[in-house]
Image (cartoon, rainbow, N blue to C red):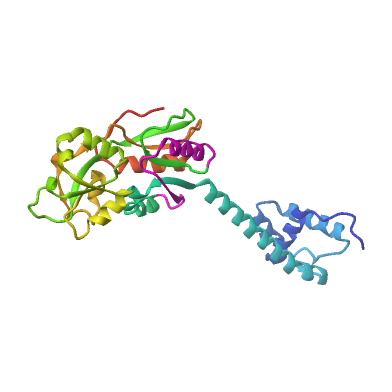
């Protein structure tokens, strides 16, 4: 018999469950409906198919040959449909809780990376994708960061100084203090050694302003990043400046530090995000977790809007 329309999906699902249940009563319990509803759906399906699916009396029900042929295939199809729906929900959950975070490479390497496992254990449902951004963005990089945040290419960005964009929410993390370090513990004064520095960095500009007389006597060697500077110290008596936050890293704890020459930068390290009427829960969770992990570094409590 040619079907005039596709059978009801609900009736097909009811049949698939009933065919594998001990009775219509058990099928009704699984589906959370009445037994009469099961009977009615089966009868509707049989009318639509033009054939009986069950031989039943008042006590038992048994599949007809047509029912026995249909039941396994239907059951398989509905199980596959359930798995597909569950995969869709999982993908949706991951997308909703994925955080794309722009983080400076030096902050990641010397401080954040060792602490991320704690965040993962506290918030296993939040997937973190890390992207490197400059720690001291130029004016052009500031504009690029603003665009990436506004266009949802990044959810959060960590950087030095404020971004000039009212569409972004910006929170203070801490005010960096940069301090001279050297590998060895010899008695050679820091002023008599070569200094490896990022010549265009805000911390070197501030150091030159505060330690003007000392800087005039120093021999300096420029490098492109703080990571290069720290790596270049190995096996030498050279000096560089690092964020005091990084000194908790085990690789730096044996270094000689000159705290009397530390300088505080004029602006703060910030974490920025696109402004929403209600910030996504994952963004709030990471931001609060991060702020709570920087208690030992002086914090500027001002929080730009």
In the rendered structure, the answer to whether residue 19 lies left or right of residue 189 reads: right
User: Seen from this angle, which residue lies furthest left?
Assistant: 187
Q: Position of residue 69 (x, y in %)?
A: 79, 71
Say if 300 sits above or below 65 in the image.
above
Residue 53, magenta (yes or no): no
Closer-to-camera residue (97/136):
136
Q: Residue at x 46, y 40 (%)?
A: 281
Q: Position of residue 114 (x, y in %)?
A: 32, 54
Q: Residue at x 15, y 50 (%)?
A: 193
Residue 146, magenta (yes or no): yes
Q: Residue at x 52, y 51 (%)?
A: 94
Say if 159 sits above or below 19 in the image.
above
Closer-to-camera residue (267/60):
267
In which quadrant is the C terminus drawn?
top left
Closer-to-camera residue (28/126):
126
User: Seen from this angle, which residue lies furthest right?
Assistant: 1
Q: Position of residue 223 (x, y in %)?
A: 30, 49
In the rendered structure, the answer to whether residue 302 lies left or right of residue 183 reads: right
The span picked out in magenta is 123-152
């Amino acid at each position: 018999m040619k079907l005039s329309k596709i059978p009801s999906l609900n009736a097909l699902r009811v049949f698939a469950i009933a065919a594998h249940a001990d009775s219509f009563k058990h099928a009704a319990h699984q589906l959370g409906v009445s037994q009469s509803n099961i009977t009615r759906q089966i009868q509707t399906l049989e009318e639509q198919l033009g054939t009986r699916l069950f031989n039943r009396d008042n006590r038992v029900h048994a599949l007809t040959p047509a029912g026995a042929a249909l039941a396994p295939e239907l059951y398989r199809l509905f199980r596959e449909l359930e798995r597909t729906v569950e995969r869709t929900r999982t993908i949706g959950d991951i997308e909703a809780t994925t955080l794309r975070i722009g983080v400076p490479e030096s902050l990641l390497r010397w401080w954040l990376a060792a602490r991320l496992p704690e965040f993962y254990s506290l918030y296993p449902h939040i997937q973190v994708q890390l992207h490197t951004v400059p720690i001291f963005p130029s004016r052009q990089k500031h504009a690029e960061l603003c665009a990436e945040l506004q266009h949802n290419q990044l959810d959060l960005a960590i950087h030095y100084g404020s971004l000039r964009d009212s569409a972004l929410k910006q929170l203070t993390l801490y005010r960096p203090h940069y301090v001279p370090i050297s590998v060895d513990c010899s008695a050679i004064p820091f002023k008599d050694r070569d200094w490896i520095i990022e010549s265009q960095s805000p911390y070197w500009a501030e150091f030159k302003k505060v330690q003007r007389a000392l800087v005039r006597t120093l021999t300096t060697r420029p490098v492109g990043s703080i990571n290069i500077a720290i790596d270049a110290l190995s096996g030498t008596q050279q000096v560089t400046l690092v964020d005091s936050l990084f000194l908790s890293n085990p690789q730096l704890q044996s270094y000689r530090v000159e705290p009397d020459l530390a300088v505080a930068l004029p602006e703060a390290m910030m974490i920025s995000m696109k402004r929403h009427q209600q910030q996504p829960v994952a963004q709030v969770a990471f931001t609060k977790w991060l702020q709570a992990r920087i208690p030992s570094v002086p914090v500027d409590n001002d929080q730009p809007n």
